C-alpha cells in the first residue's frame, strides 16, 4: 500500500519533468565588425555620458534637467519603484503567514422567571439562576508556513529578480531615449534657427533685386517681366521665413515639453544659430551591444522571467506541505470567579492536485510557448540593435562625406561672391550680378549648415544605437573593483 502511495506522489513529479516544450537557446551570433566605422573614431571615448563630448553647456544643462524633471523620466522612475514593490510582494508570499486575533465579549443575563433561591442554614442563600454578567477575553496567534521541499521559493525568487532586472533595464532604456531625444530636438531647433537666419538674408537679397528690377523697368532699361519675376521670388522667400518661424517655435515648444517645462514661454529657451561639431565616435564591435544596450538586456531578463514562470507551472503539479502552528489564550470572569486557559496547536496539511492535473499540464504548455516567444523577442532585439547601430554608423560616414563636399562648394560660392563684389566696386559688374552671386553663396551655405546639423543628429543616433547614455551594472562593478 505504501509503495502505491509513493508512486502516486511521484507521478506528478515525473509528469512535470517530462511534459512541456523544450525552451530553445537564443541565437545571438553577430558579425565581428560593422560594415562602416566613421572617422574620426577613438577607442578611448566613453559613451556613458556622451552628451558631454559635444562641449556644449546648453546641451548638458538640458539633458540634466530632463533626467530630473521630465515627465518621461519621472514616469520611468515610478515604474521602477512599482517593480521593486512587486518583487517584494512575490518573495514575501513564501514567508510565514498569519496574524494575531483578539476578542472581548461582555454578556449580561437577567432571569425573568426561574427557580426560587434556596436558603441553607449556615451557608446563606444560593441562587439557582444564571443571572449576572460574563466577561470573556481571548487571543490567538496562528501561523501558516509552506515547506519549500521542491524549490518553489527558489523559482519564484529567480523570476522576481529577473522581473526586477527587466524593469531596471526598461528604466535605463527610457532615460537613454530621453537623452537622445533632447539632444536631437536641440540640434534640430538650432538647424531651423540657422535656416531661418539664412532665409531672412535671402529675403533681403530678393527685395534688393526687386528694387533694381523695378527701377530698370521704370527707366526702360529692363522688361517689366523681370520685376514680376523678382516679386515672385520675394514672395516665396517671405513665405519660407514665415514657415521656418513656425517650425522653430514648434521645435522649441517640443524641447520644453521634453525637459518638463512645457508651459514655460518659448523665449525662455534660446536656440542660437550655431551648428557645433560632432565628437569622435568610439571604435565599437557588435558583440558589445549585448552588454551596452539596455533594451537588449531587458529582453534577456524577460527570457529568465519566462523560464521562471515555466518552472513554477511545472512545480504546481507537486504536492504542497504546510505547517500550521498556533497559540491561544482565553479568560472568562463570571460572578467574581475568573477562569483562564491557554492552548497551542501544531498541525500540518498536505495537498496534491489530482483533478486539476489536465489544466495544469495545459498551463505548462502555454507558459513554455511564452518562454519560446521571449527567446524569439530577444533574438529580434539583438538583430534590431545591430541593424540600428550599423545603419547609424554607415549614415554618419555618408554625412561626413557630404559635409566635406558641401564645404568645398560653400567656399567656392563665397569666393565667387567676393570676386563679384570687387568687380562691382570697380564698376565692372552691376548690382544684380553681385546679389545673384550672394544668393548662390547663401544657398550653398544653407545646404552646408543643414548637412552639418544632420551629421550632429546622426551622431546622437549613433551614440544611442551603440548603447550610450548609461553605465551598465557590470561596468560599474569593474570600476568599483579597480
Image (tube, grey):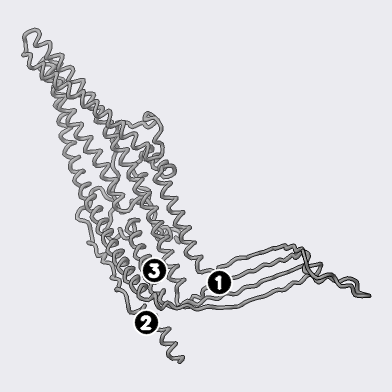
In terms of image quadrants, where is residue 132?
bottom right
- Look at mark 1 in the image and give the residue it sits on: 144
Provide the secondary structure element on which disc 1 rests: strand
Instruction: Report the residue at 21% width, 51% height from top.
Output: 391
- Look at mark 3 in the image and give the residue it sits on: 308
Front-most of 181 and 37? Answer: 181
- Look at mark 2 in the image and give the residue it sits on: 14
Q: Select label 1 or label 3 by which is in front.
A: 1
Left or right relative to 175: residue 124: right
Instruction: Report the residue at 36% width, 39% height from top.
Output: 56
Q: In the image, residue 34 lies at what x, y percent?
A: 22, 56
Q: Earlier in the sequence, mark 2 or mark 3?
A: 2
Q: Earlier in the sequence, mark 1 or mark 2?
A: 2
Instruction: Report the residue at 41% width, 39% height from top.
Output: 260
Q: Earlier in the sequence, mark 1 or mark 3?
A: 1
Provide the secondary structure element on which disc 2 rests: helix
Q: Select label 2 or label 3 by which is in front.
A: 2
Q: In the image, residue 115 lies at what x, y percent?
A: 80, 70
Q: In the image, residue 3 lies at what x, y percent?
A: 44, 91
Which quarter of the rendering shows the N terminus?
bottom left
Front-most of 190 and 145? Answer: 145
Amino acid at each position: 500500500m505504501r509503495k502505491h502511495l509513493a508512486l502516486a506522489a511521484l507521478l506528478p513529479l515525473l509528469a512535470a519533468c517530462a511534459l512541456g516544450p523544450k525552451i530553445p537557446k537564443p541565437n545571438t551570433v553577430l558579425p565581428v565588425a560593422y560594415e562602416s566605422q566613421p572617422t574620426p573614431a577613438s577607442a578611448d571615448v566613453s559613451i556613458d555620458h556622451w552628451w558631454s563630448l559635444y562641449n556644449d553647456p546648453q546641451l548638458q544643462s538640458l539633458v540634466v534637467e530632463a533626467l530630473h524633471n521630465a515627465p518621461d523620466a519621472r514616469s520611468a522612475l515610478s515604474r521602477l519603484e512599482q517593480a521593486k514593490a512587486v518583487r517584494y510582494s512575490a518573495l514575501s508570499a513564501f514567508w510565514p503567514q498569519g496574524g494575531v486575533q483578539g476578542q472581548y465579549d461582555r454578556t449580561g443575563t437577567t432571569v425573568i422567571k426561574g427557580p426560587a433561591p434556596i436558603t441553607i442554614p449556615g451557608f446563606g442563600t444560593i441562587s439557582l439562576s444564571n443571572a449576572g454578567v460574563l466577561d470573556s477575553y481571548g487571543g490567538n496567534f496562528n501561523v501558516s508556513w509552506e515547506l519549500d521541499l521542491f524549490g518553489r521559493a527558489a523559482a519564484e525568487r529567480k523570476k522576481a529578480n529577473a522581473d526586477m532586472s527587466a524593469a531596471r533595464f526598461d528604466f535605463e532604456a527610457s532615460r537613454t531615449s530621453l537623452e537622445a531625444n533632447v539632444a536631437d530636438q536641440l540640434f534640430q531647433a538650432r538647424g531651423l534657427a540657422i535656416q531661418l537666419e539664412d532665409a531672412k538674408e535671402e529675403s533681403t537679397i530678393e527685395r534688393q533685386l526687386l528694387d533694381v528690377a523695378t527701377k530698370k523697368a521704370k527707366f526702360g532699361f529692363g522688361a517689366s517681366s523681370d520685376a514680376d519675376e523678382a516679386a515672385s521670388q520675394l514672395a516665396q522667400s517671405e513665405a519660407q521665413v514665415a514657415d521656418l518661424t513656425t517650425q522653430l517655435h514648434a521645435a522649441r515648444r517640443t524641447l520644453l515639453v521634453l525637459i518638463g517645462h512645457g508651459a514655460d514661454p518659448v523665449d525662455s529657451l534660446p536656440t542660437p544659430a550655431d551648428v557645433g561639431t560632432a565628437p569622435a565616435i568610439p571604435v565599437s564591435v557588435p558583440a558589445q551591444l549585448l552588454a551596452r544596450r539596455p533594451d537588449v538586456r531587458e529582453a534577456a531578463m524577460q527570457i529568465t522571467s519566462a523560464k521562471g514562470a515555466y518552472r513554477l507551472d511545472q512545480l504546481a503539479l507537486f504536492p504542497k506541505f504546510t505547517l500550521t502552528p498556533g497559540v491561544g489564550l482565553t479568560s472568562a470572569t463570571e460572578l467574581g470567579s475568573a477562569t483562564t486557559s491557554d492552548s497551542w496547536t501544531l498541525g500540518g496539511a498536505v495537498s496534491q492536485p489530482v483533478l486539476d492535473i489536465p489544466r495544469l499540464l495545459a498551463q505548462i504548455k502555454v507558459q513554455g510557448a511564452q518562454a519560446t516567444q521571449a527567446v524569439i523577442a530577444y533574438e529580434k532585439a539583438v538583430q534590431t540593435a545591430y541593424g540600428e547601430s550599423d545603419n547609424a554608423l554607415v549614415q554618419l560616414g555618408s554625412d561626413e562625406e557630404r559635409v566635406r563636399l558641401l564645404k568645398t562648394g560653400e567656399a567656392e560660392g563665397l569666393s565667387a561672391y567676393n570676386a563679384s563684389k570687387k568687380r562691382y566696386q570697380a564698376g565692372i559688374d552691376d548690382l544684380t550680378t553681385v546679389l545673384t552671386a550672394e544668393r548662390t553663396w547663401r544657398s550653398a551655405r544653407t545646404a552646408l549648415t543643414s548637412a552639418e546639423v544632420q551629421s550632429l543628429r546622426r551622431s546622437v543616433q549613433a551614440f544611442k544605437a551603440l548603447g550610450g547614455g548609461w553605465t551598465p551594472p557590470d561596468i560599474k562593478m569593474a570600476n568599483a573593483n579597480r
